[in-house]
Amino acid sequence: QKTLYMHARLQALFAMCFARAYQEIPKYQHRDPVTSKVLFCDQCPPGTAVKRHCSTEEPTVCAPCPEKRFAEQWHWGDSCQHCTSVCKERQIVQRECNSTHDRLCECIPGYHLVVEFCVLHTACSPGFGVIVQGTPERNTVCEKCSPGYFSSTSSSTEPCIPHRNCTQLGLKTVRPGTATQDTLCDTENKEFNFNCSHQHTECHTGKVSQKEKNYKLFEIIGDTFVLVLEKIFRIFCLFVCFL
């Protein structure tokens, strides 16, 4: 127990010494113009600058940074830094300048910082999905869709999504899903009660859609037009021959 007590006291003493060292005001050397002595003056804290150096009789005198200037660290300069005037292209203000921090700019949504420029987030190709969303500081991270998942579009925000399970929906599987396509289901001539209007869903209903009807109509009109042109051409040829 005595050993544990001594160990605890040593830990407490070490913590107190560390805290005291951490809180100690940093110093800087300054030669007093009157006495020519080298003095160790207190630095000025963030948000201030040296107004008057210390002497043998007085400590350092600090003054607040004026408007549109700042000082982030302890220092011994007699002036504060100028705030960044404007953000760069494709950047917005994340935090305005104050006495202790410069104006902080960040890339607009959809872009991330590369060196000093804001670059568009990478869009994951079909068959790949987003696993880490892009931020103003970081690009999108893509990963190939795992078995049972797919992505049919290029996107910088969408992850891979699960394939439809035709069996659970009471439907027949017409085509298995791939990394870029959803599973294609069939109704097996049952009453169609599943919503196939979902952007990622593809179903085979056995019914002809309006789009398919229009396509077939255009096809019939096109064939008829070709036949009429052939007949006109033949009549024209016969007419030329008799002349």
Image (spheres, helix red, strand yellow):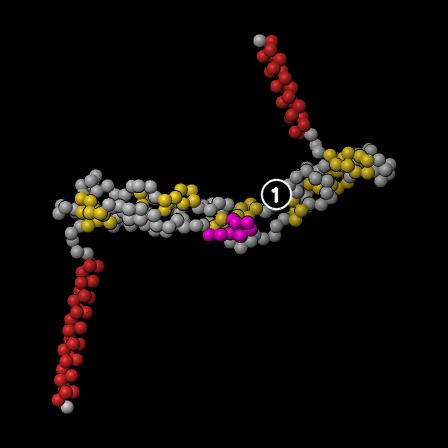
> In the depicted view, which residue is nearer to us: 55 or 216?
216
Left of 44 or right of it: where is 132? left
Residue 166: percent from the left, percent from the top?
A: 21, 42
Q: Is residue 204 above or below residue 76?
A: below
In this rendering, the answer to whether 116 lies above or below 165 is below
Which secondary structure lies at badge 1? loop
Question: Looking at the rendering, which quadrant does residue 45 occupy?
Answer: top right
Residue carrying label 1: 101
In this picture, residue 140 sits left or right of residue 61: left
Q: Quadrant of residue 3?
A: top right
Q: Residue at x 86, y 37 (%)?
A: 36
Q: For the stretch drawn in magenta, what is the main secondary structure?
A: strand
Q: How many marks?
A: 1
Residue 116, magenta (yes or no): yes
The local crowd at label 1, few if under 14, some if 14 to 19, many if 20 or more residues have their Cα within 10 Å, is some
- Residue extending furthest toward the top: 1
Name the residue located 35 percent from the left edge and 50 percent from the top edge.
126
Instruction: Kindly tell me whether residue 115 is visible in this rendering.
Output: yes
In the image, residue 56 lies at what x, y percent?
82, 33
User: Looking at the rendering, in which quadrant would you find the N terminus?
Assistant: top right
Query: Which residue: 69% across, 30% down?
Result: 24
Q: Amino acid at mark 1?
A: His
Query: Which segment did they paint magenta?
Result: 113-120
Which of the pair 45/88 is nearer the observer?
88
Quarter the C terminus occupies: bottom left
